[in-house]
Image (cartoon, grey):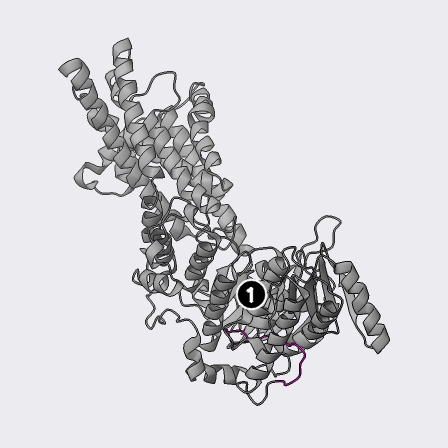
Amino acid sequence: MIQAIGLTSNPRKELPPAVDDVSFEARPGRVTALLGAPGAGKTTTLRLMLELQRGRGITYFRGRPLHRIAHPSREVGVLLSEVPGHPARTIRGQLGMVCAAVGVPIRRVDEVIEVVGLVSLCDERLGTLSRGMDRRLGLACALLSDPHALVLDDPAGGLSVTEGRWLHGILRAHAAHGGTVLFSTDDPKEAARTADRVITLEGGRLVADQEAADFARTRLRPRVAVRSPHAARLGALLAKEARAAQRSVEVVREDGNRLSVYGSTCADIGETAFRHGILVHQLADETGDMGPHATLPAEGLASATVVTSALLTSASATSTSATSTSATSTSATSTSTDDADASTEGASTEDAPTTDEPVTAVAATGAHTADEPGPTAESRTRAAASPGARDLPQLPPPIAVRQALSPLRPLRYEMRRATGVGTGYITAITVLVSSALLSVLLARIGHTPQPRLLAAWPRDCPLPPAALGAGLLGALAFGEEFRHPALAADRGTVPRRLGLLAAKLLVASVTALALAVLTVGCDLEMLYLVYGRDLAGVPADWLSLSASWIGLTVGCAWAGVLAAGIFRSTTAGLAAVLAVPVVVVPLVQKTLAGPSVRKAAGFSERLRELLLMQWPFGGARYIAAGARLVAQPVGGALMLSLTALLCAYLLTTLRSRVR
């Protein structure tokens, strides 16, 4: 069960809050619709429930708030907008990455892909998916961890009728298996047709909490839609005949040649048009919204028609919206509709209404008519085992055994994220090519020491290409999380877990190390091919130079990761990497160039005395070498920057946890 209590968003300057004191329940085994016009506060309500937006109030998921649940993805599956994935990532790669993040086996990907019908498109990239395929992928991500509750924001928006019917069938099947479903919509007919309970919002406040049957009876009103080139004349005749017969008929002139007639039937309107020789292009029963913000689609009946109950069991349900070329054919259309009503009454249940008035349709997903009571949770559970449940789409098999929390889960996620797109490979190739060409050019010009030739580091450049590439890859590690937040439901809500940070730092370190080694190897080989052995020799102090080189590239990668995690931007991460040699190094050099009263002579001996024992394997020598690296201006500036960025990251992490 989902219980929302007192949800209130923060005021927006002088404007009232978008959501004000909204409380409701969504029970298991039932589909609950959150209805409201655009701007009514539906999305804000869902974001407050999922703690994605600051505000007041609390939401309980089976008795616990979301921040108190150890594994939120196992409790609630979320679909708020388009799938937040990199456009170059494939469907299988996106789902595999999410599998690693939520801790489910990789075989779950094939099970979910088969259920949502993406088997033939599993190798397609996210940037090429249509709206319907994107909705299917989003639903697959929501079902991946086998959650108890599903929370979806306008899941059928922009979908075709067939796609929308399939999606609501999946939601009905999830509810039939005992799950809780909450979705938002701005279409009252969709809410009445697919939900068991309808919660209506208006202006950020709760105005109604009804069973779907009560909602359809009080909010929706049957009417007849008419299209005719002589709409004004036909409307006047209908109003005149209604006054003469003392019947309550309301004729509303819509855009163009459309009429909406309340209190009449297709047969009466067709006979009136036939008697007066008026051409009718379209004649259909539909249900109009009587809400305060009711709107009619500009396209007409294609998205607003709700068929009568008599036409549901017939394959010619679309014949209600018939097209005719004369008044005679219009009369024939209404006659065939009445015949269909009479032929279908015998096949309906005993509780079905027998009047000639149109009622809300019973969809294939299991919604009920306006005259039937809403099903309880017990009846819905029994319906899952009934023969009628076979018509519902199949769900992925439940996860019987959950994997224990493993420290390798963030590492698996980060590796799949980094290798799932070609950005890292393109960056590495660009760094290697540019570094090799730059080293050849520097050797041709001369006056460049051999260590700088091997690193392709001109004196006038703040950093070599390998260090810049490592910093860029590090910045992308966190920058893409905020640009394509696969770990969260919306932008800017990437979790600041220390395990995720450690995984990103480890992968960035390995990537930077590989990039440093490959860069030196490619530069050395290129110098040998172009200029021979004169410039291809190994320096005598190669060990200390290698340590400095690896420390520089790894430090730049770490600076990019931390800065992008703090400022939530890849650009900010790369700017922090460039700021180290441009801003921090001159400050450190100016500080070290000042007068010094004392020196750190004998540092290694005092380190040996600290533990009162001999350092194993000559450890004192390595520690002294590391201290010398830190004492250099670039090493000291990099260490200072990393320390400051790490402290800032930890501070923001603790601050977000306190909030």
Q: Name the residue type under label 1.
A: Phe
Describe the element under mark 1 as helix, strand or loop: strand
- If the image is split into quadrants, where does the C terminus sit? bottom right
Horizontal and vertical percent position of residue 512: 31, 36
Judge whether 162 appears above or below 90 on screen. Answer: below
Would you say residue 364 sits in the magenta stretch?
yes
| Quarter residue 339 falls in | bottom right
Residue 50 shows in the view: yes
At 60% from the left edge and 69% from the top edge, which residue is drawn? 320
At 72% from the left edge and 70% from the top edge, which residue is drawn? 269
What secondary structure predominates along the stretch shown in magenta? loop
| Quarter residue 556 falls in | top left
Would you say residue 109 sits in the magenta stretch?
no
At 76% from the left edge and 63% from the top edge, which residue is drawn? 234
Horizontal and vertical percent position of residue 17: 70, 56
Residue 628 shows in the view: no
Residue with the most extreme left position:
533
Horizontal and vertical percent position of residue 455: 28, 23
Horizontal and vertical percent position of residue 18: 68, 56
Q: Callout 1: few (<14), some (14-19), or many (20+) C-alpha neighbours within 10 Å?
A: many
Judge whether 80 appears above or below 483 on screen. Answer: below
Residue with the most extreme bottom position:
350
In the displayed structure image, the side of residue 307 where residue 276 appears, left or right: right
- The magenta stretch spans which residues? 353-368
At 79% from the left edge and 68% from the top edge, which residue is drawn? 238
Judge whether 79 appears above or below 430 on screen. Answer: below
Foreground pick, 270 / 190 = 270
Count how many numbered circles sit on residues in the image: 1
Residue matched to label 1: 183
Foreground pick, 586 / 227 = 227
